[in-house]
Image (cartoon, rainbow, N blue to C red):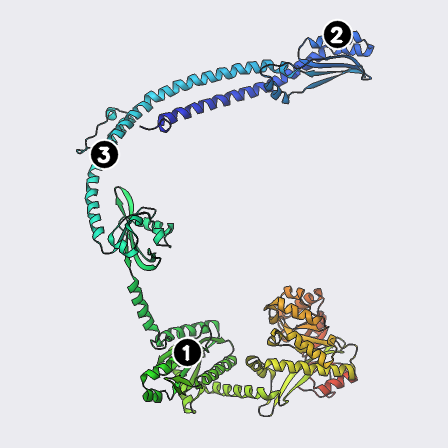
Amino acid sequence: MLALHKRLSYKQAKWALVLLIAMGILGSSFQIYTDWHEEKENITGRIIGTLETVENAATESAYTLDANLAKQVVAGLVRTNVFIEIVLTDDLNNQMAYYSRPASSNAFSWVSHYLAIDLKQTYTLELKRGKLKVGELIASIDNGAVTENFIRRNLRLITTAILATLVLSTAFLTLIYLQTSRPLSRFIQQLESVGRSKFSDGDVHFTEIKRDDELGVLARTFTTLWHQRQTVEAELEKREAYFRAVMQQSRECMLLTSQTGQILDYNDAAIHLLGYRESSIKSMNLKNIDHKFNQEVLIDWSQNALGKVSTFETRYVRHNGTMVPVEVCASMITLENIPRYLVSVRDITQRIKDQEQVKYLAYYDALTNLPNRRLLHDRLENAIAVAREHRHIGGVLFIDLDRFKTINDSMGHHAGDQLLIEVSKRINTLISKGDTASRLGGDEFVLLLPDICHDMQDAQAMVSHLAEQLLGTLSTAFVIQNVELYVSASIGISLFPLDQSDGMRILQQADTAMYKAKESGRSGFHFYRSEMQQFATERLKMEKALHHALERDELYLVYQPQVNGQGELIGFESLVRWLSPELGPISPAEFIPIAEETGLIAPLGEWVLMEACRQLRTWQQVVGLPASFKSLAVNISPFQFSREDFVEQIQYVIDSTGVDAAQLDLEITEGMLVENIKAVAAKMYALQHRGIRFSIDDFGTGYSSLRYLQHLPLDQLKIDQSFIRDITEDPNSYEIINTIISMAKHMKLSVIAEGVETNFEENILSSIGCHRFQGFYFSKPLDKHTATQCLIEKKRFPLQLNEVSTTS
């Protein structure tokens, strides 16, 4: 039997009573509210009317100063019993009559005080004779007296409403109980007796079955459903018995779980696979053995129709904490009319090992563990496609060991295999992340460099450098079976994508180049194309010659004038030149990149800085500089600037040469400023304290940002010559230059334009506010003697061709 508070009849009665009481309270509250607003107006009217009835007598008493008459007026007001204090004064505020008593008190005084909030407590009546004020009558009301009638009237109203509500509620609830609740309770009791009984023949009878109303329909429907249930239950018992027999006899781990993943049943194979005790496995959830199991997995299972299978792979946690890879097949079934999940679990440890081994053997060399020909082809085809899309250069190096067959034949295949393993290890030490070292078979290795750079000449130089490193490391002795073995290698190089060649063709080209290297005497490398080979050879010669250029005094500086709008010399830019006895004049565009790649840029930069400062000191102390001369500019390479001792190096040069640092201008590129802005700023501020100036070279081509312009000690922006060259034809170049000049003025920075080659370009630049120039129109770079002559003679620019000799 249901508890009283859970019965439908109780809930109906409770809510009906609550509803009726609430409606009664709301109705009464509304009536009291409207009645009180009317009562307030009546109270105010009565009090004002009462005061007005004595107004004439009070006025007369105040005018004649008749105290007896004033007392009579106050006495008359006292008899109304609505005032607790009355004061009558004359025009000089002298009290003529006064009355006061305590406020009346009763059981509802607290109500009176609450209602009095809306009432006016004191009324003042000015006494006038004609227009002359002769006194005042002031009266304070008794809240209990004026609200007593209202309170009693509404108490009667509330009492009547409550009684009416109770009577109506009782009648309404009695009707509900007789017509609905009592028959429904009897039907529920019969249902409970059915639930407690076992009907072998399925017979069920309800007294309400003969009724013609909804309860009769409910009883008849339940009877029909009961008979159907008996039939279905019998069939389900047969199926469940079959299911349990199959589950227990299965060799696979079988788990029966609830819809939340709680394990309800299991077989012996589950205990064997998971290693848990029988006493603990039923208290576990799938979340305990599968860390990836979550609500999303359950949703996926439940979305499958009854009997359909969800299959996936995961890792189960055994009792000892080890992980076992498993294949899980889960399906939704119905047991005892309740949805359950049947989970079949298979250990796939061996299958995964077999798959990984097959995959590994398909793509990797079993001896060296390097990628094999198949994986190399896949990566090469992908590298070619990416290189074409992004327009960068990739390369293939085909490596063949010289004399390997002799070693293999003389010392046996085991020694040959050990040598190949050691060779693969040395090759791997030289490749970068993203590159691939592979073994095609025998003594043939291939290096795939998918992304070298974007420039063809740079790519050739970098690959040549790597080939030299490979030849060097492979020429070092190998110790195999306590025997020192020496091998060399021939390397063929093919770059891509130079045409529409595919991966197979690229490999063939590298193979052909490798044989060319063997024909050239082995232990060398060869590019597939003759022009590439020629460039690589010249590049190597230049690199070797550059190592000795400083020692042999082959480098020298030239100085290109910088002028103002009046043609006065305001400074020089020092530029390095190289005259090789073997190779002739070499452009900085050719040897500076080589110096940066090989690390020679450090001693080269130190030499340039030292030589420039010595020349500047000579001009400062011997020749004398004109008043217009501001600075000598020296270019600083990113490698040189990034060194930890850069500041110390500059200070050493200044101290050793005795140069006035205030006329030394270090030109840096924008790219240096975005690497580590704090470190850059620290170095620049340290040198600024010595008086050194800073200019940004090639401004507008890099990472222009107001962020570093605002926070770094810059003095000048140098507009790149590419914008100057296009200023007459490209409106964008004009706008860019105009923007740079405006920005520089706002930041209080100087601006100089380099690469000015015509008077027309000078005029345009002058018209938009640029008044510092450098370029061939004014003068080509000068040797130090010619530059000194210009200082002595205070030459103005542009120079005539016959005035002084120049050097390019």
Q: Amino acid at mark 1?
A: Lys
Label 2 vs 1, first from the N-terminus: 2
**Residue 538 visible in the snapshot:** yes
Q: Amino acid at mark 2?
A: Gln
What crowding class fits label 1: few (fewer than 14 Cα within 10 Å), some (14-19), or many (20 or more)?
A: some
Between the C-alphas of marks 3 and 1, the distance is 80 Å
Give the quarter of the figure containing the N terminus.
top left
Residue 38 image point, x, y percent: 60, 18
Q: Which residue is mark 2?
A: 72
Q: Secondary structure at mark 1?
A: helix
Q: Can you tell which mark lies on residue 425? A: 1
Question: Against 794, is 292 above or below?
Answer: above
Q: Name the residue located 44 percent from the left edge and 18 percent from the top edge.
A: 166
Residue 767 image point, x, y percent: 72, 70
User: Is 19 placed left or right of 544 in the picture?
Assistant: left
Residue 783 image point, x, y percent: 70, 86
What crowding class fits label 2: few (fewer than 14 Cα within 10 Å), some (14-19), or many (20 or more)?
A: some
Q: Secondary structure at mark 3?
A: helix
Task: Determine contact: label 2, label 3, CB under 8 Å.
Answer: no
